[in-house]
Image: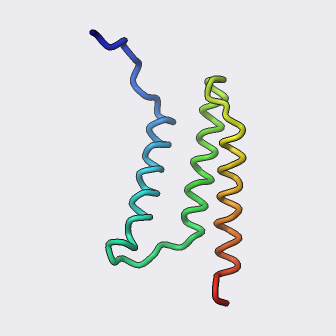
Amino acid sequence: MTRPDRPPPDRLTLLSLGLLAVLAVLLLLPLLGVARPPVWLFAALLLVRLGIQVLRARQDPRLRRPASWVLDIALIGLLLWVSQHPAGS
């Protein structure tokens, strides 16, 4: 059985995957004994990724996922709220 030929991923897709890889590494750093990155960094990277998702959806209407965007915005808002109101203070 042969695979159908697919075009290679575009730049925005590769950039989005790269941002996810950076986020994964940043989340693993505390487990490796490295200092925990600031919460705003995670929120900023997620916000950039959300912008890339919207740009990709403008190019291809099949990629429009407004429910996913709302969930991303809620997660970013929660991260920013937690950074302003840390536990135990």
Residue located at (42% from left, 57% from top): 24
Placement of 85 over or under 3, stated as above or below: below
Q: Is residue 25 left or right of residue 72?
A: left
Residue 25, percent from left and from top: 39, 60
Closer to the camera in the image, 76 or 19: 76
Which residue is at 38% across, 65% downward? 28
Residue 68 falls in image quadrant: top right
Task: Residue 8: give x, y in percent of width and height.
Answer: 39, 24
Residue sticking out furthest to the bottom: 89
Spot occupied by residue 26 in the image (x, y as percentages of width and height): 43, 64
| Coloration mode | rainbow
Q: Is residue 27 above or below residue 32?
A: above
Quadrant the C terminus occupies: bottom right
Name the residue at 70% across, 79% down: 85
Which residue ends up furthest to the left in the rendered image? 1
Task: State left or right for residue 15 relative to residue 25.
Answer: right
* Residue at 43% over, 28% down: 9
Front residue of 15/83: it is 83
Quadrant in which the N terminus is drawn: top left
